[in-house]
Amino acid sequence: MVFKMGELFCGAGGLALGAKNAARVSTDKHEVYSIKHVWANDVDEWACATYAHNIFGGDASHVINAPVQELEIESLPSIDGFAFGFPCNDYSVVGEQKGLRGEYGPLYKYGVKVLEYHQPLWFVAENVSGLQSANSGRAFEKILCDLEHAGIGYKLTPHLYKFEDYGVPQTRHRIIIVGIRRDLGVEFRIPAPTHVNNHVSARDAIESPPIGDNAFNHEFTKHSPRVIEMLRHIPKGENAWYEGIPDELRLNVKGARLSQIYRRLDPDKPAYTITGSGGGGTHVYHWSEPRALTNRERARLQTFPDDFEFLGPKEQVRKQIGMAVPPLGAKIIFEAILKTFAGVHYDHVESDWFSRTPIATKQLSLGI
């Protein structure tokens, strides 16, 4: 069984690489389950170029660079599996959390349209942890309701995955919703964490093996002498508000002091969350060298292999890396889906939310 997979909001290909690297699953009857990509879409030109370069071997004909609103969903090739990391801008706790009232919040509905028309056997939807609190929690409930009732209906398994517990060298928490078409009678189980008491550290990820000077996307950032000197006074794990920084080097900032500003990594712990945007002080900083990480170092913290080449200008590459799903985390989820359909046992845990009864039994007046 080769599941043909389509993808919306594909970005640079974190979810896709995870699916591509998912191990082929064999049954006792010598049946083999795997995933093959057939199409993808994103509005970002450079992200599409990176996706085509790495996932389709340079063949851009399968990657549609266009706003999702302009897609002719009915004309897309048929699929058995579907993935979409719908835009998180309006759900992030760092922003205003406009949720479904924002510009990007309603875009998940195009994923619902794919489910309505193509009715794939399964899907994977991804978003930030702030999704659960946007619009006082009503946005998440509305999204679950729409996904559950798309097409002939899906049985959902939402879960907040803490990717550092799965071997990703980064504290990155994301909501993943796995849906299995309800008529199939198949139930997905959340794969059990593998590294709860054995996290992979930032040092392990960045230094082993050493990154070659000619590695892809390994350009260093030029800092002002003042920033370099300030970083020299910030110990590992601390940030720009560390009390030991001389007064003349301190930032003149009023109001909230974000903990990630000029924060240096602790080499013996997973990195803090890699982001795809932000000005000075948000680039993630080395624990011993007074500098920001290179894009290749950030990519390693996201578990992209060194032969995965990001295309585009430096800041566009940073954006692609920061917005991606860690391929290692995605791989574990896709392998669990393959094992689910193959009837192969794997260690699993219960969802940290709820055992859902069909939401149709609830009378929802969401007003959003």
Image (spheres, grey):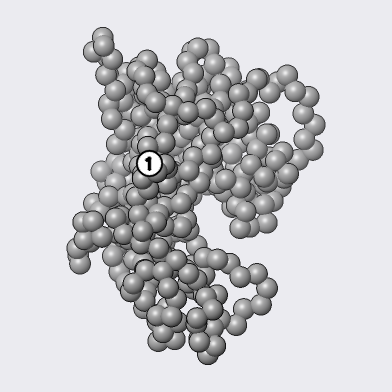
Location of residue 74 in the rendering, given as x and y in whole percent from the top left corner: 51, 28
Look at the picture and state if 95 lies above or below 223. above
Residue 77 sits in quarter: top left
Residue farthest along the bottom direction in this orientation: 248
Query: What is the secondary structure assignment of the residue under circle 1?
Result: loop
Q: Which residue type carries mark 1?
A: His
Which of these two is toward me, 104 or 297?
A: 297
Percent from the top left, x then y, of residue 358? 66, 20
What residue is drawn where x is 62% and y is 53%? 93
The residue under the point 56% across, 81% down is 251
Mark 1 surroundings within 10 Å by alpha-carbon count, few (fewer than 14), some (14 through 19), many (20 or more): some
Query: Is residue 187 depicted above or below 208 in this figure?
Result: above
For mark 1, what is the residue? 195
Residue 138 in sight from this viewpoint: yes
Q: Is residue 146 left or right of residue 154?
A: right
Front one among 283 and 51: 283
Relative height, residue 41 to residue 147 (above, below):
below
- Locate the N terminus and report the quarter of the image it occupies: top left
Percent coordinates x, y for residue 355 in the rendering: 60, 23
Q: Quadrant of the C terminus?
A: top right
Q: Residue at x 27, y 26 (%)?
A: 24
- Report whether 256 appears left or right of 184: right
